[in-house]
Amino acid sequence: MTKGSVRLRAPTGLLHVFLLAPIAYLIAMIGLPIAYNIIMSFQDVQLGNLGDFARPWVGLDNYRNAVSDPVFLKVVHNSIVFVAANVAGQVSLGLFAAVCFARRFPGSSFLRGLLLSGWILPGLVVGAIWKWMFASEYGVVNHALMTLHVIEHPIHWLSDVSMAMVALNIAHVWFAAPFCMILIAAALTAIPEEQYEAAALDGAGAIGRFRYITLPALRPTLLAVACLVTIFSMRAFDIIFAMTQGGPLDSTNLLPLLSYQLSFQQFEFGTGAAVGCFSFVAVLGIAIAYVAALRHEEPA
């Protein structure tokens, strides 16, 4: 230390407070509910003994009951389809929108804000809006398709088993794609403009520049975004509850909604906790993959 310089040292006690405060928050708001749910999944919890601390232990019976239920297998299949459709749709639309807005054009700021306006709405509100839009008789979707002569008769979007998941995916992709756009647009700004200029001088067209410059540079970001979309889609609840509540015939039922139905509609709290644990393990595995993707991301 040179003469006249001053070394600033924060009080050790204050550093401990700043460190312990977020840890205590995470334990209280995340750790304890997760631990409570895991313990409940090994107990026989009914409405009569919900407030008791001493409950009968049943081991893995709740997990066996959940897995042996044909509805559970159908819900797992629905969850896989829903997640796959949302990853493909959200990442593709987010990438397309980010590339479009990478260049300035008249009204670009207004259109970007317009896209983000849907993302900031609560999920229940978005689900209610899309439920009205997909209504069979007075919905704007059927009216537009019939006006354009795409269809001759109204489609029962939310009451047809074969169409309900399609409608749900459309609504959820529309709702969450702006989030992907923000992340991908931030990564686009880190690509040096000189690379595009050099490629243009070498005769590369727009498709070539996108294929050989943009996509390789965005590969780590796209992987991380796909992991995040998978996590968010696995825990989707509000839009599904507002649009279909899992119907018709469980064709749009997903793991979080099934856990809610078992716990708060059928009062099978132990089985509902077991289904929640299945969902938690899946999300945890994807989160670990997301962290691994961030570690391998090369700095710009």
Image (cartoon, rainbow, N blue to C red):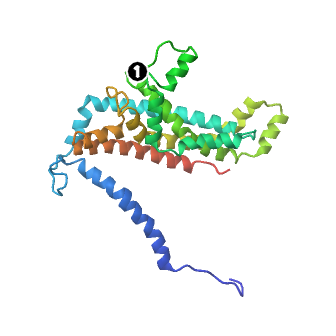
**Residue 220 in sight in this render:** no
Write the residue at 66% across / 37% down.
Answer: 215
Tell me where residue 298 appears, x and y as whole percent: 63, 49
Q: How many marks?
A: 1
| Side of 144 relative to 35 (left or right) | right
Q: Residue furthest top?
A: 152
Tell me where residue 200 appears, x and y as whole percent: 82, 35
Q: Nearer the viewer, residue 277 or 112?
A: 112
Image quarter of the N terminus? bottom right
**Residue 233 in sight in this render:** yes
Q: Nearer the viewer, residue 82 or 134?
A: 134
Question: Is 71 rendered above or below residue 177?
Answer: above
Write the residue at 30% across / 55% down.
Answer: 35
Write the residue at 34% across / 38% down.
Answer: 257
Q: Nearer the viewer, residue 153 or 13?
A: 153
Write the residue at 44% across / 36% down.
Answer: 128
Question: Is 68 rendered above or below residue 16?
Answer: above
Q: Residue furthest right?
A: 201
Tell me where residue 95 appears, x and y as whole percent: 62, 37
Q: Amino acid at mark 1?
A: Ser
Which quadrant holds residue 177? top right
Question: Is 256 rendered above or below residue 134?
Answer: below
Secondary structure at badge 1 equals: helix
Tell me where residue 98 appears, x and y as whole percent: 65, 39
The 10 Å Cα crowd at callout 1, few under 14, some 14 to 19, many 20 or more, is: some
Residue to which mark 1 is pinned: 162
Q: Residue furthest bottom?
A: 3
